[in-house]
Amino acid sequence: MSSNDTNVRKQKGRRAIRKKTEESKGLSITSLLDVLTIILVFLIKNVSMEAVKISELPDMKYPTTVTVETLMDNALVTPVKLYTDRVLLGLDNQLLGSPEDLIENVETRSVMLEFFQSEMSEIPEERYDEACLIVQADGDLPCAYITEIVRVGTNTGFQNIYFATLEEADWLSSYASASFE
């Protein structure tokens, strides 16, 4: 073997060491920001800044929400309270009977009709459209009882009928104890 062959072998046997490239200094988020900017532009363009407009019919009246206290301060209000065991009429809480009597007993319905008519007779004729019947019912009652009161009330001339649920006098204490269990 010649000396040239030995040099070549040594060169072949040596590994060429390369310098490592510099490690990246951090993740480049330029492309991510570009994509997010484009998405943001599309979202802003497609979201309408105007409030949603509802097409209103000229003769349509939307229901309003009023507290019971506000209604009761009005002299033109006739309240009816339906409990599971009794029905009370007016501000004086006159006992009418049971909810079942509203459906089954004709006399009970006629007493309720007379009561509503007497309430309407106390209201001046020019204020009939302001008179309202408020039906406060227990949440566990079937709808048929409420429907019967509404039917008699509209036949009497009440144009405004409001609905509310009755709560027990100690509802807060029963609610608090149930939440801790």
Image: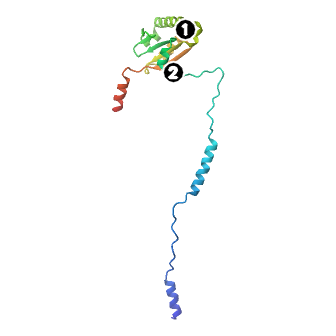
Q: Which quadrant is home to the C terminus?
A: top left
The amino acid type found where label 1 is placed reads Thr
Q: Residue at x 34, y 32 (%)?
A: 180
Q: Is there a contact, CB below 8 Å, between mark 2 and mark 1?
A: no
Relative image position of residue 136 (x, y in whole percent): 46, 17
- Numbered tag placed on residue 66 in the rendering: 2
Relative image position of residue 137 (x, y in whole percent): 45, 18
- In the picture provided, is 95 more to the left or to the right than 122? left
- Indicate whether 20 appears above or below 143: below
SS at mark 1 in the image: helix
SS at mark 2 in the image: loop
Quarter holding residue 55: top right
Who comes first in sequence, dot 2 or dot 1? Answer: 2
Residues at marks 2 and 1, CA–CA distance in whole angstroms: 23 Å
Relative image position of residue 123 (x, y in whole percent): 54, 7
- Indicate whether 76 appears above or below 33: above
Q: Which residue is mark 1?
A: 156
Between 149 and 102, the one lying in front of the other is: 149
